[in-house]
Structure formats: structure tokens, C-alpha cells
Image (cartoon, rainbow, N blue to C red):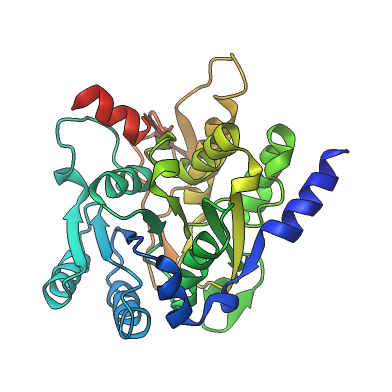
Amino acid sequence: MFYLNNIKSWLENNTFNSLDFSNLNELFKKKNNKTISLVIPTLNEESTLEYIIEKIMNELNNDYKIIDELIIIDGGSTDNTKIIGQNLSNKYDVVKLINEEDILTSYQSKKGKGNQLWKGLYYSTGDIVIYCDSDIKNFDVRMIYGLIGPLLNDNKIKFIKGFYERPLIINESSKSNEGGRVTELCARPMINLFYPDLSGFIQPLGGEYGGYRNILESVEYMTGYGVEMNILIEIFEKYGIDIMGQVDLLKREHRHQSTNALSKMSFIIMNTILRRNTDAKLNSNLLIKNITKNNNSFLKNNIEDDNNINQHFSLINNANDEILPAINKFINDHF
């Protein structure tokens, strides 16, 4: 249990509050000529994307150029997300819309959120790179300046992860504090088993995080839902826990995944951790029960099954993520 003392110390010294960095004038001064890229992955997020970008441009970047480059990288949206993104790109010089499939076209890999983040890192130019999801209903600019603040104000912090209260919203009248189901039922037990030093991260799978380019470019990504877990482990193994921090972003509301989608996410998270810690041959196919494809303002489901087995099960072939090489290694090997 000796590691608990280290965790307590880390929690005390490496946990921050976003509101401590709300003075944008001071934050801008702290940049000291450093450039910051914000990468936002999208897939059918027409209901929230414009709201998020407008908040950033009008509240965060209005008086001070906190964000030097804002990249929307789309994973193949079939709604109006790309149209909205292009209009925003036309409106603001710092906003760029790119398509996942148009970046590094010669490199073949699975599509997915992790692939978008990896390609967004490759495409971006900032000294600091911040990631933010595009489905946040209650987005506030503290979710961005809260991530930037520790990276600029604390010399030891090179990677920062956001955490927040995450309510589970079923409908307009039903709300509970039971969000983050994959985190609590899958990721947290697995982290405690294999990486107890990382067990102090409150939201290890959260989509709001960032770090210095040299750190992010030195670690492997995963093509899909395993990307956040893998980045966390890679940075810990290469650099140690002391350069890592977390910041309270207060509260986050977004569309939740269906139980079927959570099953696939859990499968990928477990595979991401187990592949690093066992020589056993892990099955890559997922027999999943009762696939539901309903999408509404409270629920989303982006998974696709390959074939029906019977009325109870469908099969997702090769459900695992693929490993994406560290960007610096990729560049050295291919250019």
C-alpha cells in the first residue's frame, strides 16, 4: 500500500481548478510566445459544434489570442457538421476544417476518434496541443483555459487531463450523477490492477486533455476508444507521474452512449490495457447483444455490427483498436 502515499502527494500537488486560470490577460502573458493548437474531433455533432466554436472565439479569443489554431477534424459526418465547420472556417482565420480521410492518405489504418486525434496532432503546429470533444452541451471556455493554465503556470506539468461532474441525462426530467459508466465499471478497476500509480486520475477516459507537443508526439495512439487510456499509460511509462496533472473543469453534459456502444468501448479499453500486460492471445471479435441504433438529443450510437448471429446477438469483427505509431517516429520513418 506504499503507493497510496505517492498518490496522495500527487493529488495534492498535481490537481488544479480551472477557475484559478480565468484571468485571460494573465494567461496570455504566460504564453510567452508559445503557440497553442486546439484540436476538436467531430462525427455527427451538428447540434453542438457551432455553439462550442462561437463560445471559444467570442469569449476566449476575443480580447486575447489564447488559441492560435483551432482544428476541426471530421471523421465522416453524414449530418450538417461539415457544413457548419466550413462556415466557421470561413468566418474565423484561426479555424480550419479538415477531413480525417484527407490527412496522411498513404498510411492505412482504422478510422476512429483516436485516428482523428493522431492526425490532428500531425496536422497542427502549436507548441501546446489541446483536445476537446465536440458533443458538450454545457460547454464553457473554462474547459479550455482550465487545461492551458497548468501547462503555462507550472513548469513541471507537461500533460494535463480534465475531470468534472458528469451527470447521466436520460431525458429532460431524468438526470443522475451516474455518468462515466465505462470509467467506473471497466477502466478504473483495470487501472488499479495494472497501473495503480494512475489510479488518482478522476476521469482517465475524459476527452478534454492536452500537453506539450514533444510529449504527445513521442507516444503511441490508438485508432479508436482506447486512445485516451493508451496515451495516459504511455506518458506515465516514458516520463513518470510527476509531469502529469489533472484539472477540475466543474461539470460536463453530453449525449451518452447506448449500453451496446458501452460494451464495445469496454472491450476496447480492456484490450488496450491487457495487450501491454499479457502474452495471451486476445480475441479481437465481439459478440454483442441487442444492438440499438437509436440516436437522439440524449443518446448516440456510432457502432456498426457486421452480421446477425440470431435474434439475440450480432458480431463485430476485429473490434479492437489498431496501434498508431508515435508521430515523431512516424515522421522519421516516412519522411
- Quarter holding the N terminus is top right
* 135 or 36, nearer to the observer: 36
Left or right for 200, reference 222: right
Looking at the picture, does residue 270 appear above or below residue 155? above
Who's the residue at 37% across and 32% down the image?
326
Q: Is 224 positioned to the left or the right of 265 in the image?
A: left
Position of residue 116 measured from the top left corner of the image (x, y, whole percent): 30, 48
The quadrant holding residue 317 is top left
On the image, the x and y values in percent for residue 289 come to 51, 42
Please tell me which residue lies in front, 268 or 65: 65
Q: Which image quadrant: the C terminus?
A: top left
Q: Residue furthest right?
A: 1
Is 328 drawn above or below residue 156 in the view shown?
above
Q: Position of residue 34 (x, y in %)?
A: 36, 60
> Looking at the image, which is closer to me, 234 or 157?
157
Residue 208 higher or lower than 223, as above or below: below
